[in-house]
Amino acid sequence: GTNAQDGDCIYIHGGQTYYNHNFGSGGLNNGAAMSLKNLRDIMVTSLPGTGTAKIKIDGSGGIVASNVVRLSVSNLEIEGPNADITFSAAQADRLNHSPYFSGRGIVVWSGSHIHVHSCHVHHTANSAIRANKADYMLVEGNRVHSSTWWTSNGESAIVIAEAEPVDGLDEIKMRIVGNEVYDNENRISYYNENYDDPEYLEKNQMHVARENYGSSLQDFIIDGSGVYITRNSNSYVTGRMELSNNLCYRNGINGVVVHKTDRVLVKNNVIFDNGQVPREAPQSRQAYAGLTINNSEDVTVYNNSVVTTLPDDYAYAISGTTYGFIDEFGVDRTAPENLNRHCGGLVKSDFGDRVVAGVA
């Protein structure tokens, strides 16, 4: 990755396992296995005909990219250290955010035209796949599980945040499509040393969700979902996003979340048995365990199916949001076959008659 030049294909020989520098040394501050910076037209994949290459990490990430244009990452397995971490060790590091306890699988910190597909990313201490300050992003056909267990960053399995448009087109440019996302949850309470700074909160579209949220005193857990797009409405002023055909189950809080993000299409997702974080103290999660939409404008929601384990968890929750039923092709999706469905669980009244009982 360090030696890559624009236009390179980086082939990783399959059937072998690769590690970040100093892997297994016991250090808490190891770096990423591969870093890609200031590059264009790059492909990273397993060498065809050799099987799937595995990257095993105990540092800041598997593949970490910044300022990249037209990057494809595919057909890789990335495994983090979650299975080797104990609760007591992670809790002791909660205020430090050491890379060992907060490494991500595939992360893009800035760039455009990114395609992450057909990867198996699991047991990463933090997000499995994440993009900040990106545009034209497609996260497609990945299997993501057992991530975000030990981070105190309050992250979710697949995340798009703080997106920035590279043009003024009003079309779908950010997509999370056809991924299987399961067994991801936060087991450590969120901590952010900047939560006592009102200017920081406003700049980053953050807020104090509960008393002590983000502080060293927080002992509850209300973060850690499957697919999560957040804090995009201030920065992503043109362009649209799509969350579709994802299978999200057994995650800590919700399966799919749209949070402070405008112009979103949410369709054909199957979401079940989420809300794995206990509602009892000390975790005390909120009673949401399905599809949640908060403080977002122009959201289209149809043909999703949600099953909840607890009858008093919300399968569909919505607040501070405007939504409609015209899809990306201009088709009206108010017909009965396009209704959202649920089995068990509660539905916020704001959804009106757009959610009906019964899941196919």
Image: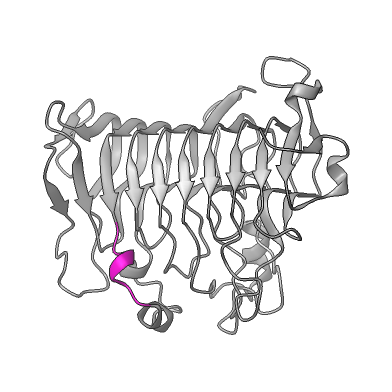
Which image quadrant: the C terminus? top right
Against 126, is 241 above or below? above
Against 233, is 331 above or below? above
Viewer can see residue 50: yes
Which image quadrant: the N terminus? top left
Against 128, is 193 above or below? below
Q: Is 84 contained in the magenta span?
A: yes
Q: Count of labels shown? A: 0
**Coordinates of residue 72 in the picture (x, y in percent):** 32, 31
**Coordinates of residue 54 in the picture (x, y in percent):** 20, 46
26 displayed left or right of 73: left
- The residue lying at 79 percent from left, 38 percent from top is 355
- The residue lying at 33 percent from left, 39 percent from top is 119
- The residue lying at 15 percent from left, 72 percent from top is 25
| Depth check, front residue: 207 or 338 | 338
| Depth check, front residue: 359 or 275 | 359
| Depth check, front residue: 189 or 291 | 291
**Coordinates of residue 345 in the picture (x, y in percent):** 74, 53
Viewer can see residue 1: no
**Coordinates of residue 149 in the picture (x, y in percent):** 43, 65
Q: Which residues are magenta?
A: 80-86
- The residue lying at 28 percent from left, 35 percent from top is 39
Against 284, is 359 above or below? above
325 displayed left or right of 239: right
